[in-house]
Image (cartoon, grey):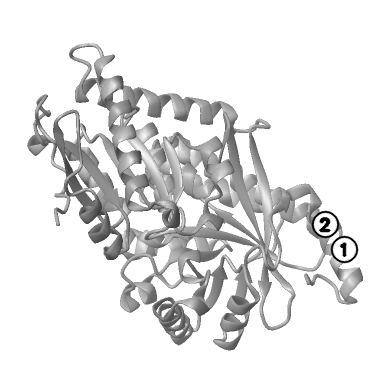
Amino acid sequence: MTMPEPPDDAARAPARGPGDPWIVLLVDDEPDVHEITRLVLADTTFSGRAIELHSAHSASEARAFLEQHRDTALMLLDVVMETDDAGLRLVHHVREEMGNADLQIVLRTGQPGMAPEREVIAAYDINGYFLKTELVAQKLRSIVISSLRTYSYIRTLRPAGDAPAAAAESAGQRRLAVEDAFEAALGSDALRLLAQPQVHLASGAVAAIELIPNWRRGDAMLGPAQLAEAIHDPELRQRFDAWLFTQGCAWAKAWRSLGLPAFRISLPILTDDDWDHRLLASMRQALAAAAVPEGAIDVEVPGTLLLVERPQASDLVASMKAIGLSVTVVDFGLGLVSLPRLRRLLPDRVKIHHSFVRRVTQDRERAAIARSIIALVHTLELSVIADGLASEQDLQFFKWEGCDIGQGDLLAAPMAVSDVSASLRHDATQAGRPGRLH
């Protein structure tokens, strides 16, 4: 089984000759899928050329491989791997970051509910979408040959000399164009906020409202994860964070003036490593202008702050808490979990990544990880949020395990931020208790 090597610009694989095998990359976290696919395609050829099948077991492995093998013809891609949208984010990376429009991308999913065909085909530049249960041996071979034929045709239309350097230049230009468009969208209708409640699992009371930025670009809607991937410029990230923070403070003031029950406003900022004192100053200024009480605004920081030793990360969290903010570490569980680092960072709470929350009752390993995270975080006397609750079974699991707060469509779907007050008042009337969602 061939595994991808780490990317190295100086050691990229040489360009393929006319008689060399076609490079096909299979990206899937299920080992059996690799073995079966290898057996099915073992003797398959197209245009007199064999197929050289490579394996990647995660989106990050696939990125490394594709950087090194720019003439990969076809990628057979799973959607749900290290995260529920890992495959879709890889598609975005290939098309937008790498500028690779030639690679044929065929999605193969065993969980169509996580990536509905109609939505994925409309929003992502892919060349095919199939359920794994549909792909019997003959159909898989047909898809592969059809994709290689398309790739071959595209390459014949490519002008001579239009190679990886041009693709890299195109990717850089495309990234700048995305950032220019995002900068123009700041403060416009193209960038809007949705609101999703976080609910105390024991009582059903609203603990917080997360403001979720969404940027419509063409036919695609980019949420926080996609924005973090698309926007690299530190200055632009901080301008967005300042805008989001100002919005959060304004809504906190407005909802408080309506007499709604007290709850936090949670904000998923983009800035992590490239923290600037100016952003902290703008946060302090916005807090003072809105006169919001201490702890009313929560800042979500990425779990990557825990992956390596970063003294500045602890200083950052301490500085935010010093001006009256609360801090939540999000995407918890995706990387290495270090108790000493978490103790030094000492946020107010952590949010378990949704890949360890959804279908937790159907996967023993997932349940064990979720149970361990809750115990670890409670050892430090911090609160735990389960993100992505979508079924009654999963909700009962996290209640039973003593998780503090839940978030997900089962409890409350994202809504227009302007509808929050009416929704909370309606639920309070229905339940007979203020600020509850049922």
Between 294 and 38, the one lying in front of the other is 38
**Which residue appears at 25% of the width and 45% of the height?**
25
Is 207 placed left or right of 222 in the picture?
Answer: right
Up the image or down, 72 lies above or below 115; here it is: above
Residue 428: % across, % down: 87, 70
Q: Which quadrant is home to the N terminus?
A: bottom left
Amino acid type, mark 1: Arg
Q: Which residue is mark 2?
A: 421
Query: Splitting the image into 4 quarters, where does residue 426 fall?
Result: bottom right
Q: Is residue 255 visible?
A: yes
SS assignment at label 2: helix
User: Along the horizontal axis of the image, is 373 left or right of 393?
Assistant: left
Residue 13 vertical position relative to residue 410 in the rendered view, above or below: above
- Would you say 260 lies left or right of 2 here? right
Q: Indicate the position of residue 311 as horizontal and vertical percent values.
A: 30, 63
Where does label 1 land, which residue? Answer: 425
Q: In what quadrant of the picture does the C terminus appear?
A: bottom right
Residue at image position (61%, 79%) is 393
Which picture quadrant has residue 8? Answer: top left
